Image (tube, helix red, strand yellow):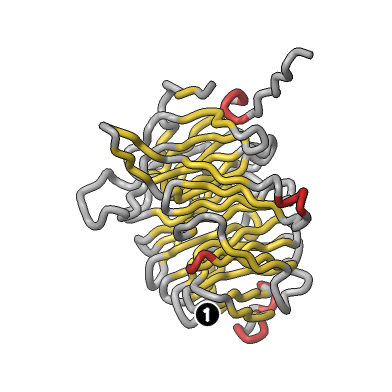
Amino acid sequence: MTGVLPNSAGRELSNPPSDGISNLRFSNHSDNLLVSSWDRTVRLYDASANVLRGEFFHGGPVLDCCFHDDSSGFSACVDNTVRRYVFSSGKEDILGRHDAPVCCVEYSYAAGQVITGSWDKTLKCWDPRGASGQERALVGAYPQPERVYSISLVGHRLVVATAGRHVNVYDLRNMSQPEQKRESSLKHQTRCVRCYPNGTGFALSSVEGRVAMEFFDLSEAGQAKKYAFKCHRKSEAGRDTVYPVNAIAFHPVYGTFATGGCDGYVNVWDGNNKKRLYQYTKYPTSIAALSFSRDGRLLAVASSYTFEEGDRPHEPDAIFVRSINEVEVKPKPRVCPAP
């Protein structure tokens, strides 16, 4: 049985970006929230207090951002740069460059490195401690089969999803070649990849209203667990409308996950039991990004039109922070049939 919650979309943050929101991330240490936008800014919010703590301006739209720690962060920009910020001082510098727009940035606590993916068909690893010069900061550059669209980390594992439905899995301790080279099990363009918190696999979403649940274990038994499911679709008068699934976010405590689509809905799923747990009230426009806070008490939702239907009038870009009830994200116990 699935539920539709009647409660509100959550608390709307003041001072939102003035153009499309490309990503948002909660800190691993607090309720600070980092937001990147097509309005050429990265914004730092205290999500609990609803306060804008800082704003950093770029030479072009910003496609991704992530925290280093609670005092600094990184961004990926259309002007081909990877930038670092120190929030307290407002200081920023360029960590490095790609040959085309940078669309993904992650910080690996396991490796102590910044990892970036670009439309120049490369993945690059950077040591932020060596940033007195960009050449010293660059640890390595790794060619990819196509433009990088999404990356995700868990421990020493890195998953890279590119155009052409390619998926490469790396071990950060040996980046000389991918540990696994895969093809997406979904037939259409990949929109988002996110690793399971327990490190056993990853979820992949596509522009065609589907999510695939994949596993790293290549044994027959391991691969038998994988499956895909349809979501973010609407059926009216015998006609199906299928929406891109832009965002996936795993709950840090329960391992359940939320998906956000261009239909304006956020759904919460129990991947192990293959059930939808909840669907939240419809948001004003497309869901561009999602992030759970470190303890899973809060969910940040970017309601931001992603131009899937071209340039048309749309609702203003907004960030909502909703308090999570356990019933929305906790897996329901399996009911075993009576003997």
Left or right of 132 on screen, residue 246: left
Q: Residue at x 61, y 45 (%)?
A: 227
Residue 94 visible in the snapshot: no
Image position, residue 34 (x, y; %)? 52, 53
- Compared to 145, does 33 lie above or below? above
Q: Quadrant of the C terminus?
A: top right
**Which residue extends farthest top?**
338
Image position, residue 129 (x, y; %)? 70, 74
Left or right of 38 on screen, residue 111: right
- Compared to 248, does 6 lie above or below? above
Q: Residue at x 55, y 76 (%)?
A: 145
Q: Which residue is mark 1?
A: 97
Q: Residue at x 39, y 73 (%)?
A: 59
Residue 142 visible in the snapshot: yes
Image position, residue 82 (x, y; %)? 53, 72
- Compared to 322, does 242 lie above or below? below
Q: Quadrant of the N terminus?
A: top right
